Amino acid sequence: MDFFDLYITELAAFGEQFTEVMSPLVILALFFGTAFGLIIGILPGLSVTMAMTLLLTFVFRIPFEIGWALLISVYVGGIFAGGITAIMINIPGTPGAIATCVDGFPLARKGKSRETVGLVTLSSGTGEIIATLVMFILIPIAATLALLLGDWELALVCLIGIILAGAIAGDNPIKGWMAGIMGLVIAMVGLEPIYAHPRFAYVPELYYGIDFIPVLLGIFGLSEVFLVLKEKVPYSLPGKPEKAIFMWNEFKRKKKDVVRSALIGMGVGIIPGTGESVAPWVSYTFAQRSSQNPEDFGKGSNEGVLAAEVANNATSGGALIPTLVLGIPGSGPTAIMLAALLIYGFRPGPMLIIDTPGILSMTVVYFFLAALFMIFVTFLFSKQLISVLSLKRDLLMPIIVVFCVLGAWAANYTLFDISVALAFGVIGCILRLRGFTLAPLVLGVLIGGLFDQYLRRALLTYDANIFALLSRPIGLFLIAFMIFLLYSSFKMKKVAKEKEKEKLSEEVCDTTD
Amino acid sequence: MSSGEKQKTQDHQNTSDLLVGLLFLGLAVFIIVESAGMLHRGQYLVDAPGFIPLLMGVSLLVLSVIIITQMIIKKAYLDVAGWTLDNLRNDDFKRWMAVFGITAVYFILVGRFSFYVLTFAYLLAMFLYFRSTKIWLMLLVSFGVSLLVYLVFYLGFRMPLP
């Protein structure tokens, strides 16, 4: 089957499932999911990954279409809302919104927060839609190519994910790799797939392995609660919350910038574990280079905010490509989406869109509608959304703990899973305090089982002859590709770091003045 | 922040990295020892259930040795006593310990007492610790969340609660 056939099958299947996929309940789920994502993204201390993890533990009780729509809309709303906090209080709601602070907050201090939020909403929504459409075009091509991969190549792809996520997502690659290896080992607990030999199974519950839901709840939920409640960071809104102003004409003038930033975000987002934090900086740098007023960047430039925010939103389209085609999540939220697919009984990988025609179109349409709802909700309720920022986090965080307990319990109805969540909450907290990034750890937990299976099967097929494996052309290409990606990603990271340093030094200058 | 304070913070960070490196070293040794015991199964060594965990353990060992060596070069071991004392005096650390302590008690007691009562008590204890708001509001929120759990999860989702 070539990729052209895939498009035809995909669209035909979507047409057949249209009434089911676009039922009123799904539309409602998309609307409320986007609003929920926006609130979560704005709420101090809550992350979109945490919200999606909590949601994940309950969505499997509802039909796939509604659950999938909810997760996608929370993702879209949450990622965008991180930019609002960056503009309003100089605190990035998501790692991808750090670049938005550079120009967003100075604009808010100049009294232009309403216009900035409006412009960014329109551009981010459009960027999201562009990236999702490009994703629709690329996924069948990527899936057709991925079918050429054997066990050895798939094991290499898993390894590429861990190495890249470790190298790029944090400050120190060694720490990232350590976290990734830890994740892989966690995934290997329990009866192994070939001989059913128990590995690290010291209590009967461990024979089934460690369920990823309590691990995710501990790492993204509890560790975040512990870290947020550890310190009280005071912040205040620069003014009274007011409704955003949508400047349509200004938006029309920025069409080219939006398309460029969306494509950059989408392209960088494909790299597993890195896109979200790196893409906005790359896009920001490109915008500054091509701007007619580069001197305004860092002091409150609309173009700077727009470039960072559009790329931030567009990463979701890019991150979905490795998630759906290879089963390797491109970011924290896509890791949760991967977990959701597994819970619903799908097997992410090149066969996903062949075995389940219609799923790709459904995903694209949900992203599209979520982006429209995001613009609509912000247009109507921006004042109310911004006032959410004044909610007390020490009142909110303990409630999150209760939902984490319920989520961990709901995974298998065992008290053991609740203890696992607490243990990983502490581990996650300690690792984050020491600058370990958790993306590779989560990636390791999710793909560790597959990596083990692929690698051992490949070694068995080739009678443990590693040289025979190394001579496979696609494997060789993947190894070369891994080296190239490492190099280019390190380079992008350097650019991002330099920008961050510049921002810090400017802040110091401002304080001194 | 003065340069002395900056240096102190850097020293403390190095000490923390050294300690975390040692923790990972311990974990790596444990993985290696355990997976070495699984190597007797299978036709080839690479086929044994313990082969991939062994590879992971060795990789973790190498990486943690690199971190430890980096920190030893920076003489992080000299600051262990200061790091411990400063952490014990640190308000953030005390708050962290309190939050963790209350939460751990809640997790341990889940399944042994009524979930609603326990949740109410946990939330109230946390709100009281942080003096989050007025007492009547703390009581109201704690009660409201417990009620919400009952209505949504027990009645709505028909989910058995711990």
Image (cartoon, coloured by chain):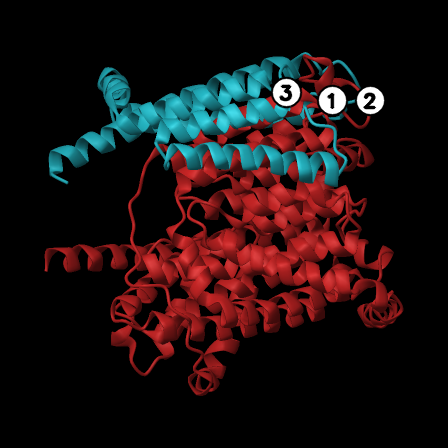
Label 3 element class: loop
Residue corresponding to mark 3 = B114
Q: Is residue A480 above or below residue B47?
A: below
Left/right placement of residue A39 relative to residue A85 reads right
From the top left corner, tell me how far across and down residue A499 is, in percent: 32, 60
Which chain does tag 3 point to?
B
Question: How far, Cα to Cα, is label 3 from label 1?
Answer: 42 Å
Label 1 element class: loop
What residue do we see at 56% from left, 27% from top? Answer: B119
Q: Which chain is cyan?
A: B
Circles 3, 1 touching at the beta carbon (< 8 Å): no
Which chain does tag 1 point to?
B
Q: Is residue A455 above or below residue B46?
A: below
Label 2 crowd (10 A; few <14 / some 14-19 / many >=20): few
Label 3 or label 1, whichever comes before in sequence order: 1
From the top left corner, tell me how far across and down residue A334 is, in percent: 62, 51
Q: Which amino acid type is marked by label 2? A: Tyr
What residue do we see at 23% from left, 28% from top? Answer: B11
Label 3 crowd (10 A; few <14 / some 14-19 / many >=20): few
Q: Find residue A195 and name its label.
A: 2
Left/right placement of residue A153 relative to residue A441 reads right
Q: Find residue A398 and name its label.
A: none
Q: Which amino acid type is marked by label 3? A: Ser
> Which label sits in the foreground, 2 or 3?
3
Query: Which quadrant holds the C terminus of chain A?
Result: bottom left
Residue corresponding to mark 1 = B49
Foreground residue among B42 and A402: A402
Label 2 element class: loop
In the picture, residue A442 is in which quadrant? top right
Question: How far, Cα to Cα, is label 2 from label 3?
Answer: 42 Å
Q: Which chain is red?
A: A
